[in-house]
Image (tube, rainbow, N blue to C red):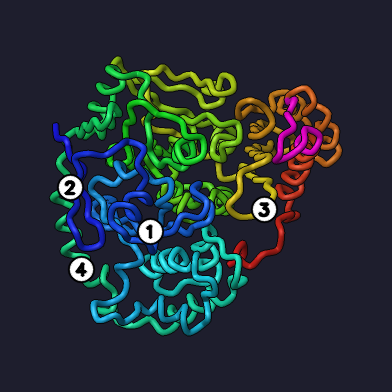
Amino acid sequence: MTDAIRFILNGDDITLTSVRPTETLLDYLRLQRRLTGTKEGCAEGDCGACTVLVGRLVDGVLVYESVNACIRFLASLHGTHVVTVEHLASANGALHPIQQAMVDCHGSQCGFCTPGFVMSLYGLWLSTEKPTRADIERALQGNLCRCTGYEPIIRAAEQVSAARPSSIFDPLERNRTDILARLWTLRSGETIRIETSGEKLVIPGTTSALAEVLAEEPKATIVAGSTDVGLWVTKQMRPLGTVVFINNLSELQAIHASDRGISIGAGVTYSQALDTLSTHIPALKPFIHRIGGEQVRNMGTIGGNIANGSPIGDTPPPLIALGSSVNLHSKAGMRMVPLDIFFIDYGKQDRRPDEFVESIFVPLPPAENHVGVYKITKRRDEDISAVCGAFNLSLADDNTVRSIRIAYGGMAGTPKRALSVEAFLRGKPWTEETVLAARDQFDRDYKPLTDWRASAQYRQLTAKNLLLRFFLESTGTPQGLTRFEEVA
C-alpha cells in the first residue's frame, strides 16, 4: 500500500500525498501550478475551454486523449501524462504548427476558448495523420466558440494537416520513448489510500482489491470517467464521502469480440469501444459519435453509464435491445444479470452496495437482423437525450416478425423495453400497416414525464414515430439527415 499519487505534468514528475478526492485537475492547474492557459467556462464538460491531453498506457501503447479538466478529478490521474497548452511552444518561443495555423487562419478572436481548441486539434494531430473534415468536426464537437463561427478553426486544422512538418517540432513525439518509460515506472499495482481533512480516496491496484475496499466501505462512491459524478461536485456541491477511483485498473479496460459476442470491461471508454462495436454492430457507430463531445467520449465509460442508472443514459437502450447482460463482482463472488431487469426503478438497480460492474456482455445479432438506434436531442451534437430508441429485429422467410426487442430511454424512470409493442408485432407481417397499428401499444408501455428537455406528449409521439422510422429504414428507405460526416 502507498499514500501518494504520481503522474507527469508536461515534463515534470509530480508526487502528491495530500489530495482531496473531489479536487479537480482544472483547479490544480490554475491555482497551484499557475498554468492559466486552461480555462474554466462551464465547469460541466460542455464548452471545452479546459481541454488538456492525458496520455495513458493502453495495452502497452502510449495514447493521448483530450479530456475536460473541469470535471476530471486529480486523483484519477495516477500513472498518466498530463499535457497543457503551455507545453506546445518550443523553448525559444516558436509556436507549435497547430498554434501557428490558428494565427494564420484567424482562428481566434476574444481568445478565451482558443487554448481548448488548440488542445483538441493537438489530440487529433497525434492520432490522425490525414484527418477528413468529418474527423475535424468530431474532434471539435466538445469545444464551443462564440466569436469565429468555427470555419477559421477548421481551416487551421486543414492547413496544418495538409503541410504536416517533421515530428521533431512536436514535444510529445520527440519525447515519446522517455515518457513511455517513465509511465511504466509508475505502474506498481499497489492500492493507494489518502485521507485529507477527513475525506478519503482509494485507488485499488486490482479488481480483487476493489472488491475488498467495497466490502469494507459499501457506501463509497465509485468513479471511472467522472463525466457525471464530476457535475455532482462542480454544480451540485455534493459531498461524496469516500471515493474509489477505478480508471487505472487494466483488468476493467479490456474489450474482446468472439463469435458469441463482445465482452466490454466496465472501464472501457466510449472511444475505446467505438472500433470494436461499430465493426460488429454498424448501427452503433453514428450513435456513439453523438455521445457527448470527444473529451466526454475519451473519459466516460460504458460501465459507468450503466451503473449510474440514469433513465436518459445513452448506452442502456441499445444494449438492452441487443440482449446484453451485466457482470457484477463482489468479495462474495460474481453474478450475471440481464440488463433489461438490472434497472429496477428510478435511481435503483439490482446491484448491492458491495458490488461493482465488472463487465458487460453484448451478444452479436445475426447478420440478417435489422438493428437501429436513434438519439433525439435539442441540438445535434454534445447534448443529452430527450428520447433514445433502439430496435433489434429478426424476420422470418415470409417477412413476419420472428422476434423483436425494443428499448427506450427518456420514456420512464429507467431505460425500459416496450414489451406490449413487441408482443403485438411478434408473428405479424412486417408491413407499414402492422407498424402503424402497433403504435397504440406504446400507451400501454410508457407514461413519460414532462421536463425542460421535452413534454410528455412530444416523447410519446416521438417514440411512436421512431418505430415507423425504423420500419422505413429496415425496408431500404434511409431516413437520416443528409450530412457529409455520415457519408464520409
Q: Residues within 10 Å of mark 4 (few under 14, many from 20)?
A: few
**Span colored in magenta:** 446-459
- Helix, strand or loop under label 1: strand
State the residue at coordinates (47%, 50%): 297
Q: In front: 262, or 98? A: 98
Is tag 1's residue or tag 4's residue first in the polypeptide sequence? 1
Is tag 4's residue or tag 2's residue first in the polypeptide sequence? 2
Q: Which mark is residue 379?
A: 3
The amino acid beneath tag 3 is: Arg
Q: Is residue 401 visible?
A: yes
Q: Which mark is residue 15?
A: 2
Reply yes or no: does residue 374 show up in magenta: no
Q: Is residue 362 visible?
A: no
Label 2 to label 3: alpha-carbon separation: 42 Å
> Contact, CB < 8 Å: mark 3 with mark 4?
no
Residue 468 location (% of width, % of height): 78, 42
